[in-house]
Amino acid sequence: MKTLNIIASAYRATVEEQDDTIVWLTHAMKGAGAGIDVLLRGNAVNYAVRGQNAAGLAFGGWQQTQPPRIEHDVAGLLAKGVVVHVLADDLQRRGLESTPLIDGVQPLRGDALAALLVGYDRVWHW
C-alpha cells in the first residue's frame, strides 16, 4: 500500500525533540519498508527551503543546544527514495516562490493536487 503523508503543521515538537515528529515517523516507516511519500503544505512548506538554520534559538535565559536540522531531515527522506512534494500555492502565499528549495523537492500546483491524491491508497494529514 502506498501512503501520502501531508504535513501542514510546521516545527511540531522541534524544541523538545529537535526533530519534527512526522518527518521522523516518515523516516522510520520508510526504513521499515513502507511505501510512503510526503506533501508539504501550509506552514510546513518552510521545510522545503534550502539553507535553514535554527542555531541561536533561545527563550529567555534558555539556549537550544541541539537545534532542529529540518533541511537535513528532508534531504534524508529524499535520499531514502521518499518523493517530497511542496504545494507551490502555499510557497507563494508565504513569499517563498522564488526561494531556493532543497534539491529533489518537487513543487506541485494546487490544481494538480487531486490527481496526486488518487495515486495513493492512504492519505494521512498531519
Image (cartoon, helix red, strand yellow):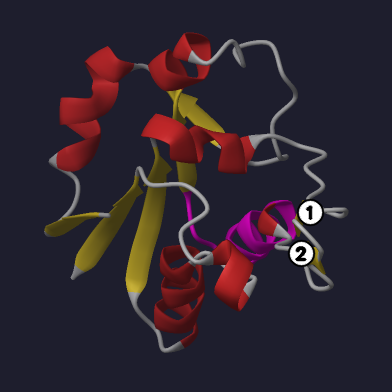
Q: Position of residue 32 (x, y in %)?
A: 42, 89
Residue identified by numbered label 2: 67
How many residues crowd around disc 2 within 10 Å: few (fewer than 14), some, or many (20 or more)? some
Q: Is residue 80 visible?
A: no
- Secondary structure beneath disc 2? loop
Cβ–Cβ below 8 Å for labels 1 and 2?
yes
- At 62% from the left and 16% from the top, the residue drawn is 96
Q: Which residues are magenta?
A: 71-83
Q: Is residue 84 visible?
A: yes
| Mark drawn on residue 57 | 1
Q: How many discs appear?
A: 2
Query: The N terminus appears in which quarter of the rendering?
Result: bottom left
Which residue is at a point 65% across and 63% down the rendered structure image? 73
Residue nearer the viewer, 116 or 11: 11
Residue beneath the point at 38% across and 31% down: 42
Q: 121 or 94: nearer the eye?
A: 94
Q: Relative to 8, does residue 99 appear above or below in the rendering?
A: above
Q: Position of residue 6 (x, y in %)?
A: 31, 48
Q: Residue 124: where, in percent of width, then height?
A: 20, 57
Of 32 and 89, nearer the camera is: 89
Does residue 30 appear to the left or right of 15 in the view shown?
left
Of residues 18 and 116, the one drawn nearer to the viewer in this rendering: 18
Label 1: how many residues lie within 10 Å, few (<14), some (14-19) or many (20+)? Answer: some
User: Which residue type carries mark 1?
Assistant: Leu
Estimate the spatial distance between the alpha carbons at disc 1 and disc 2, rounded to whole Å: 7 Å
Give the answer, above or below, for where 37 lies relative to 21. Answer: above
Q: Quadrant of the C terminus?
A: bottom left
Does residue 109 appear left or right of residue 44 in this picture?
left
Dot 2 amino acid type: Pro
Please name the predominant secondary structure of the magenta segment in the image. Answer: helix
